[in-house]
Image (cartoon, rainbow, N blue to C red):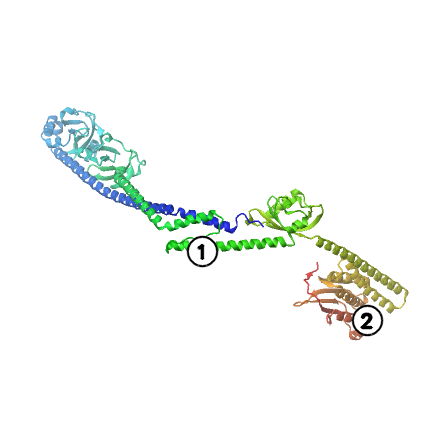
């Protein structure tokens, strides 16, 4: 027998070769794993550290930034209050009479240089209609111009409140300015005018200490008028007087405008992610903001990460070199063993034990490999012995053997099939199954092959053609194991003699069946002849008793004839269906003996069971006698009623019970005397003893006769339809 494509020993050699290659790459794998683990650890630590440092630095910068903006906001608030104080002092010196004398107002302003010096855009006195009455310096030429459209002037004149105005472009200065206005009150406390100081944002002013400084390298400061969503001034002069986005555009900016004080990271209107700290200036209703781009804040972290990467790279290379050197030193005995294993795996020689250089973990491993090699050598020897024994069995078996591929070509045959077919082994090898099968067409053979592939196995009978053209019967047992890479194992048994014996047996059986049919047919005919003779004799006699006796004899013979007719009709002569037989017998007996004028009905309730002829014949006779007895004595004078026949199992045993009863007049007082004198009842008792049963006569509204008997073999029973 040929070896399978990859026997266990070859698979073992392949496994050894795989182990050798694997260990050959072990040093590289461990080194790469160590490097990967080291790099992962370094970078995980670096990322975690940088994240923590970034959060800590952001919290620290946020606190410092908010502290700085708080100081600046306090300074601005102090400057605003100082200017409100100076304006209030000057306003207290002006009375109603002075408001009508421009020269007096000009002289008063000239006498207050401190107040005028606080406002680089000048000081203006307004009348109640909002017209400028006097100013310093006179070069601005604002006297006579109405400024009632300025919000802070209107608030002072109408409501008597001091306030800081919205930064606007001045009508005369043609530059960004904002005013600080206080009301002028008369002796009665009523507002009679207003005094305003103007700050020119385009010239040096008290806000320059904020706008002239940067925050960090790219950050800056802002003073914002939240009421008008307007930047008053900023470190970036180009953003002065810039209008901020409307409500709902930038949520963090909206929170600052609504009075939030603190620090928050958000994207500013310029699209830059910034860290902003805000503090309110209460006296001006402004807020001071310090803004630092997040990119500048995180720049030190990025620099630190780059340095960590450089350090990690150097440490990784160092760890890789040291790991490689250590592995090469420790695994050198293993690498030597690996080379030996690779050489053994490529050769066909039996595996040899590997040398053990030192007794350590590597030595234990090589010892385990040596043990494996010993086991492989033992299994290879056992496999060769097993293959030799299997080949001997296939060569000496009485059945033919094939090994066939999935296309139906013979790969191997044994000598037995060569003898059966008349072909030599060389002639058979390479032949197709269709060339040998005489019962199937080539397409049918291919379909049969596919069926065996799907089912895994099949057994069937066919006919093969010998080399000389003769054919013989073959029983085929085909198996398609999945482990054999698409190869069938087929055993072929010559069943020609068995087929011939089976055919001879079938012929003999048919002859015996024909003989039995003829015997039963003749018996039935003879019984019918006897019945006819009895009927003729009954017609000739005039004695009533003789007629009754002859009629009883006809019923008994009719019951035996009916049994033979049933056997002849079914073609089964060893047994008969007792239920069907008793139903037919009772029907015929009732029709033959019942009085046509009486209203008597037959009720049959029988189960179906197969019994032998020896049991069926006496059962039929005693049922015939009992039905005849019921019809004779149970319904005198045309009385109506029922005759009941039942066949049922006895609960808890293999016994059967046959009962015949009626609803007639019942058993008379002289029944026991008539029983000893009645041939029919004596016959019933004899028949009951013949089948090994017991006869019981029970009381009731009518007569009840019950015979209980046992079957020789217990058979399954089913209720009759």
The picture quadrant where one finds residue 223 is: top left
Residue receiving disc 2: 679
Q: Is residue 423 above or below residue 623?
A: above
Q: Earlier in the sequence, mark 1 or mark 2?
A: 1
Residue 365 shows up from this direction: yes
Q: Is residue 541 left or right of residue 445?
A: right
Residue 326, percent from left and from top: 33, 49
Secondary element at tag 2: helix
Label 1, label 2: how many angstroms apart (C-alpha)? 97 Å
Residue closest to the eye, 563 or 480: 480
Q: Residue at x 74, y 55 (%)?
A: 506
Residue 344, percent from left and from top: 46, 49
Q: Is residue 248 left or right of residue 194?
A: right
Question: How many residues crowd mark 2 within 10 Å: few (<14), some (14–19), many (20+)?
Answer: some
Residue receiving disc 1: 371
Residue closest to the eye, 245 or 153: 245
Residue closest to the eye, 33 or 380: 380
């Amino acid at each position: 027998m040929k070896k399978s494509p990859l026997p266990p020993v070859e698979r073992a050699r392949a496994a050894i070769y795989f182990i050798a290659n694997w260990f050959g790459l072990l040093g590289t794998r461990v080194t790469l794993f160590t490097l990967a683990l080291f790099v992962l650890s370094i970078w995980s630590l670096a990322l975690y550290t940088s994240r923590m440092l970034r959060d800590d630095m952001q919290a620290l910068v946020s606190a410092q930034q908010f502290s700085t903006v708080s100081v600046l906001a306090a300074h601005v608030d102090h400057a605003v209050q100082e200017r409100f104080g100076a304006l209030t002092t000057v306003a207290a010196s002006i009375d109603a009479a002075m408001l009508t004398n421009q020269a007096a107002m000009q002289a008063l302003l000239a006498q207050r240089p401190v107040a005028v010096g606080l406002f680089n855009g000048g000081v203006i006195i307004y009348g109640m209609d909002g017209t400028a009455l006097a100013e310093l310096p006179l070069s601005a030429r604002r006297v006579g111009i109405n400024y009632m459209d300025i919000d802070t002037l209107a608030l002072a004149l109408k409501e008597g409140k001091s306030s800081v105005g919205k930064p606007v472009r001045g009508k005369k200065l043609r530059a960004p300015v904002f005013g600080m206005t206080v009301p002028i009150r008369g002796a009665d406390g009523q507002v009679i005018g207003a005094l305003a100081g103007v700050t020119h944002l385009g010239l040096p002013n008290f806000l320059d200490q904020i706008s002239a400084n940067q925050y960090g390298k790219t950050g800056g400061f802002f003073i914002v008028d939240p009421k008008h969503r307007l930047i008053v001034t900023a470190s970036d002069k180009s953003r002065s007087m810039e209008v901020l986005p409307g409500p709902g555009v930038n949520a963090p900016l909206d929170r600052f405008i609504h009075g939030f004080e603190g620090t928050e990271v958000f994207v500013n209107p310029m699209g830059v992610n910034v860290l902003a700290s805000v503090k309110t200036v209460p006296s001006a209703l402004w807020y001071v903001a310090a803004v630092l781009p997040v990119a500048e804040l995180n720049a030190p972290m990025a620099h630190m990460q780059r340095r960590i990467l450089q350090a990690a790279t150097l440490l990784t290379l160092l760890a890789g070199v040291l790991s490689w050197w250590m592995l090469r030193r420790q695994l050198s005995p293993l690498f030597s063993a690996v080379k030996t294993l690779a050489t053994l795996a490529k050769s066909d020689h039996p595996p040899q034990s590997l040398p053990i250089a030192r007794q350590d973990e590597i030595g234990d491993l090589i010892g385990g490999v040596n043990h494996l090699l010993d086991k492989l050598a033992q299994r290879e020897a056992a496999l060769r012995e097993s293959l030799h024994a299997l080949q001997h069995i296939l060569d000496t078996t009485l059945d033919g053997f094939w090994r066939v591929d999935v296309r139906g070509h013979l790969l191997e045959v044994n000598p037995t099939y060569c003898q059966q077919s008349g072909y030599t082994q060389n002639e058979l090898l390479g032949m197709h199954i269709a060339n040998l099968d005489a019962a199937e067409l080539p397409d049918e053979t291919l379909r049969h092959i596919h069926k065996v592939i799907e089912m895994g196995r099949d057994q069937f009978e066919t006919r093969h053609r010998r080399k000389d053209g003769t054919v013989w019967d073959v029983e085929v047992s085909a198996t398609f194991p999945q482990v054999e890479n698409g190869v069938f194992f087929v055993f072929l048994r010559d069943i020609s003699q068995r087929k011939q014996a089976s055919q001879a047996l079938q012929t003999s059986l048919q002859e015996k069946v024909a003989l039995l049919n003829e015997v039963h047919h003749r018996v039935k005919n003879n019984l019918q002849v006897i019945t006819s003779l009895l009927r003729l004799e009954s017609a000739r006699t005039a004695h009533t008793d003789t007629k009754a006796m002859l009629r009883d004899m006809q019923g008994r013979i009719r019951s035996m004839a009916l049994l033979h007719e049933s056997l002849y009709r079914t073609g089964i002569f060893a047994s008969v269906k007792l239920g069907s037989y008793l139903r037919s017998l009772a029907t015929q007996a009732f029709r033959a003996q019942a009085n046509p004028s009486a209203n008597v009905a037959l009720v049959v309730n029988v189960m179906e069971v197969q019994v032998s002829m020896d049991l069926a014949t006496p059962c039929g006779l005693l049922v015939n006698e009992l039905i005849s007895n019921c019809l004779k004595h149970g319904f005198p004078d045309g009385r109506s009623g029922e005759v009941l026949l039942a066949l049922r199992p006895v609960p808890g045993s293999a016994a059967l019970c046959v009962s015949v009863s009626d609803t007639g007049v019942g058993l008379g007082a002289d029944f026991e005397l008539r029983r000893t004198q009645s041939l029919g009842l004596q016959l019933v008792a004899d028949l009951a003893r013949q089948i090994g049963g017991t006869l019981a006569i029970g009381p009731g509204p009518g007569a009840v006769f019950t015979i209980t008997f046992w079957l020789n073999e217990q058979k399954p029973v089913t209720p009759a339809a």
